[in-house]
């Protein structure tokens, strides 16, 4: 199934018979056609779908539809570079590299000499 068809099938329960026309209008915002849709375009398309559909069906349903469309990406840390995500926005996904990580219980104590600190402790 093509990516556009998956988006149509997710959107149809929310938008009914107007789904295809509605989605094609949103694709114009991101300079895409149904045939040229790719996964990198999904975040921008989902944003436009939420903006436009909340006028028709309310904010809660529009947000739910946006989340379902974003779930097509199956976000995981290995695929984030494909989306060209800004590192400052990664905290939205709880993946902020700037955020201090918890220390592993298996790391070396801080009072060891510097040449021994990098050795794993089992």
Image: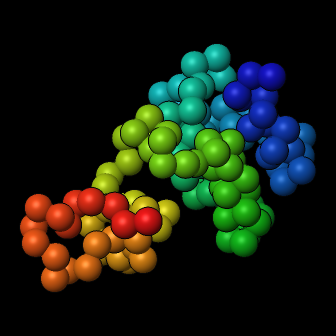
User: Does 88 appear above or below 5?
Assistant: below
Q: Which residue is drawn at 89% across and 40% down?
A: 17
Q: Residue at x 84, y 38 (%)?
A: 9
Residue closer to the observer: 38 or 20: 38
Q: Which residue is drawn at 57% across and 32% down?
A: 39
Is 11 left, or right, of 67 in this rendering?
right
User: Does 9 appear above or below 108?
Assistant: above
> Is residue 60 in view?
yes
User: Does 64 appear above or below 41?
Assistant: below
Residue closer to the observer: 17 or 83: 83
Looking at the image, the residue that sits furthest to the top is: 35
Residue closer to the observer: 88 or 7: 88
- The percent coordinates of residue 52 (x first, y second) are 62, 54
- The percent coordinates of residue 109 (x first, y second) are 26, 79
Q: In which quarter of the image is the C terminus?
A: bottom left
Residue closer to the observer: 19 or 78: 78
Query: Where on the picture, by quarter, is residue 35?
Result: top right
What colouring style does the render use? rainbow
């Amino acid at each position: 199934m093509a990516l556009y068809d998956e988006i149509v099938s997710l959107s149809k329960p929310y938008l009914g018979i107007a789904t295809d026309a509605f989605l094609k209008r949103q694709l114009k915002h991101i300079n895409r056609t149904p045939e040229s849709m790719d996964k990198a375009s999904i975040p921008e398309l989902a944003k436009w779908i939420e903006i436009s559909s909340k006028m028709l069906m309310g904010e809660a349903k529009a947000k739910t539809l946006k989340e379902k469309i974003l779930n097509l990406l199956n976000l995981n840390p290995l695929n984030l570079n494909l989306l060209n995500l800004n590192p400052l926005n990664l905290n939205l996904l709880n993946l902020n590299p700037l955020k201090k990580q918890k220390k592993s219980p298996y790391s070396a104590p801080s009072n060891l000499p510097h040449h021994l600190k990098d050795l794993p402790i089992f």
